């Protein structure tokens, strides 16, 4: 499994800048923009860890809710739960995942269940990609691991 | 400053609560519109932060509801939601919201925006105090009664809930004024006001109509219940003693109670009829010897 890059505090910005200059292949492993996440929580690392833990705890249930709603062909419920997820992934600065959730929300609102099923598959993949990085953040191991080092 | 957060996402709610608490606000989270409404109506909330998509409906509906209700119209509302399209923002602001923040929000900016809402709330409170309160006693005034009673009648009619009203006045108040002087009389009125406020629920509306005349609007209360509360209040009034350099005086009140009965008239006419009926009962209480309550029994 590839190691994941993330910054633990503002002073790691330097490291982040170097990362952004890294090749595309390496950068794509950073699924959570950790500097944005830290900014979103007002630079409160405890709050950040709490939020991440809460997300990890809740996300299986939330995905289950969406899966059920899709099975019931309940587009309104799909859109509503996806909306919640869009917000949460936005706070976590998980851009690709948040975009997938937004696609799902929109598909739900437009009652397009085919598009919703596709967006859901993408969302599940994105959340799966998030989990290792979030788990590291939740456990509070606040150090920078740079891919390829 | 109490901030009502209407948000079904646990993490968004926690993030908002923590940020606000650190800034000295008192946040409270409602996960549904149904749980949020009483916190606003019963007067707990100073500011409302609303999400759009909630398990029991759209936050827009709650915003419209708050703005249509005299009890909550003054509450500053801001939306905090991940919907960012132009029409959503316009729709929210046109529904009565003062601000619209997209998620994920920037913490410092969000707190500054909530600070603006807190300033708006303070200014609203001041305007309402100046226009709707009696300066001597701090109770609601006649202008408030004229605006609010028809709305309460409309609500009672729609919800098919009872609504009672009382008119009270201090027995032989003129004698108190003549004997002890007007400053003492004013202190007696303030003491009676505090007594009235304490004897009724916070959702009841106590008004000083003028002079020594007071009105109470009691939502969700039938005339029998109203008479029981009024009797308890009369007991407490008898135990009240107004003291000053001018002397010591005891006082009593006479009260008339009337109940809203849907007569199909428009709310302002019904309001007039309700007060007239309570007045008539007050007159009977006076003539029967004062220090008592007369309630109009609906047919």
Image: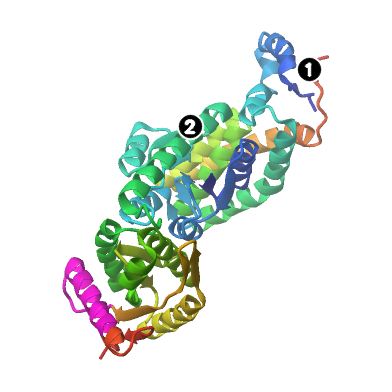
Q: Quadrant of residue B279?
A: bottom left
In the rendered structure, which segment of residues is drawn in magenta? Answer: B260-283
Residue at figure coordinates x 67%, y 42% from the top left: A55
Chain where mark 2 sits: B
**Secondary element at tag 1:** loop
Q: Nearer the viewer, residue B159 or A10?
A: B159
Q: Is residue B129 left or right of residue B104?
A: left
Quadrant that contains the C terminus of chain B: bottom left
Q: Is residue B271 magenta?
A: yes
| Residue mark closest to the camera, 2 vs 1 | 2
Quadrant that contains the N terminus of chain B: top right
Q: Is residue A85 left or right of residue A105?
A: right
Q: Is residue B5 magenta?
A: no
Residue holding disc 2: B113
Q: Is residue B159 visible?
A: no
Residue A146 numbered tag = 1
* Residue B5 image point, x, y percent: 53, 47
Q: Is residue B34 left or right of residue A94?
A: left
Name the magenta segment's main secondary structure: helix
Q: Quadrant of residue B159?
A: bottom left
Residue at figure coordinates x 27%, y 60% from the top left: B142
């Amino acid at each position: 499994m590839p190691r994941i890059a993330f910054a633990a505090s503002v002073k790691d910005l330097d490291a982040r800048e170097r990362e952004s200059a890294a090749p595309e292949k390496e950068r794509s492993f950073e699924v959570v923009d950790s500097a944005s996440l830290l900014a979103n929580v007002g630079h409160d690392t405890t709050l950040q860890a709490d939020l991440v833990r809460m997300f990890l705890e809740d996300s299986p249930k939330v995905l289950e809710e969406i899966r059920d709603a899709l099975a019931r062909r309940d587009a309104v419920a799909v859109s509503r739960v996806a909306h919640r997820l869009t917000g949460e992934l936005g706070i976590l600065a998980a851009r690709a995942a948040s975009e997938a959730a937004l696609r799902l929300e929109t598909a739900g609102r437009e009652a397009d269940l085919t598009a919703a099923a596709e967006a859901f598959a993408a969302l599940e993949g994105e959340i799966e990609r998030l989990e290792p990085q979030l788990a590291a953040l939740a456990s509070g191991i606040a150090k920078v691991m740079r891919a390829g080092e | 400053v109490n901030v009502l957060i209407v948000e079904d996402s646990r993490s968004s709610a926690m993030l908002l609560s923590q940020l606000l608490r650190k800034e000295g606000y008192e946040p409270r989270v409602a996960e549904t519109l149904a749980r949020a409404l009483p916190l606003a109506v019963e007067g707990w909330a100073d500011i409302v932060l609303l999400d759009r998509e909630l398990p029991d409906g759209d936050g827009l509906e709650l915003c419209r509801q708050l703005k249509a209700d005299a009890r909550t119209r003054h509450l500053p509302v801001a939306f905090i939601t991940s919907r960012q399209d132009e029409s959503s923002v316009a729709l929210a602001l046109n529904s009565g919201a003062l601000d619209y923040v997209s998620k994920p929000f920037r913490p410092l900016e969000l707190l500054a925006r909530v600070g603006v809402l807190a300033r708006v709330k303070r200014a609203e409170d001041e305007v309402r105090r100046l226009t709707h309160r009696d300066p001597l006693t701090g109770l609601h005034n006649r202008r408030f009664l004229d605006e609010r009673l028809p709305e309460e009648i409309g609500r009672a009619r729609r919800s098919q809930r009872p609504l009672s009203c009382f008119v009270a006045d201090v027995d032989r108040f003129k004698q108190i004024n003549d004997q002890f002087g007007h400053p003492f009389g004013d202190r007696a009125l303030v003491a009676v006001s505090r007594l009235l406020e304490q004897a009724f629920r916070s959702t009841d509306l106590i008004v000083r109509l003028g002079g020594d005349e007071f009105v109470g609007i009691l939502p969700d209360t039938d005339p029998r219940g109203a008479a029981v509360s009024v009797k308890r209040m009369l007991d407490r009034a008898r135990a009240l003693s107004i003291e000053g350099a001018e002397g010591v005086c005891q006082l009593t009140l006479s009260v008339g109670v009337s109940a809203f009965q849907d007569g199909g008239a428009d709310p302002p006419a019904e309001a007039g009829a309700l007060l007239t009926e309570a007045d008539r009962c007050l007159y009977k209480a006076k003539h029967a010897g004062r220090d008592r309550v007369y309630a109009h029994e609906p047919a």
